[in-house]
Image (cartoon, rainbow, N blue to C red):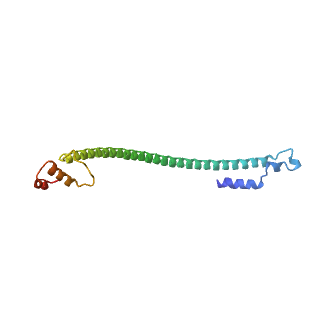
């Protein structure tokens, strides 16, 4: 290739452009075919060189575009995978929270039922006395003792020994 380049360089020193071929009046009617041929050959070589450079640049750009497209595709796949994993994780957590909520609600209902049963059991041995006036300031033990002794006529010693 270097021999071709050197011959082109030698020719380019002696060549003239088409415009130069028509400058002088004696050349206006006839073409200097050799000089025009050399100019055309030189232009053809330059066009071929430029076209080759352009093809190389296009191939390089195409390779870069393909590489970038693959990188973007890989990143997109990673993002989609992570999004899918995140959605699964959120769904799992949501389901787990729903289950915990149901379980907690069931436990609360169970505790309420047990509390009602405990209150019923606790009241089972309570004594209800009707007809005695209720005063918030009074001591209930003294009121019951007085009722048992004076209203029902139970001996004072027996009433005092009772646990109220």
Residue at the image position 17 percent from the left and 50 percent from the top: 147
Snapshot quadrant of residue 160? bottom left
Please provide percent x and percent y for residue 5. Answer: 68, 54
Residue 64 on image: x %, y %: 56, 50
Image point (67%, 49%), residue name: 50
Asked whether, in this view, residue 89 is left or right of residue 119, the answer is right
Identify which residue is drawn at 72% across, 50% down. Answer: 42
In the image, farthest residue toward the right: 25
Instruction: Work out whether residue 39 or residue 69 is closer to the camera in this orientation and state it.
Output: 69
Between 63 and 153, the one nearer to me in the picture? 153
Frontmost residue, 66 versus 150 = 150
Residue 2, x across and y down, in percent: 65, 55
**Residue 155 relative to residue 27: left or right:** left
Q: Which is nearer the eye, 104 or 162?
A: 162
Place of residue 29 in the rendered image (x, y in percent of width and height, measured from the top left): 86, 44
For the image, the number of numbered tags is 0
């Amino acid at each position: 290739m270097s021999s071709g380049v050197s011959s082109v360089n030698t020719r380019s020193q002696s060549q003239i452009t088409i415009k130069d071929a028509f400058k002088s009046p004696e050349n206006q009617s006839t073409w200097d075919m050799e000089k025009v041929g050399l100019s055309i050959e030189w232009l053809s070589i330059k066009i071929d060189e430029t076209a080759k450079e352009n093809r190389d640049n296009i191939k390089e750009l195409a390779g870069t575009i393909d590489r970038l497209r693959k990188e973007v595709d890989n990143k997109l796949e990673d993002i989609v995978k992570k999004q899918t994993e995140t959605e699964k994780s959120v769904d799992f957590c949501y389901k787990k929270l729903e289950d915990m909520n149901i379980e907690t609600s069931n436990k609360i209902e169970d505790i309420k039922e047990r509390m009602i049963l405990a209150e019923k059991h606790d009241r089972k041995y309570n004594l209800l006395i009707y007809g005695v006036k209720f005063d918030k300031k009074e001591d209930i033990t003294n009121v019951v003792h007085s009722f048992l002794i004076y209203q029902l006529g139970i001996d004072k010693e027996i009433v005092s020994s009772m646990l109220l």
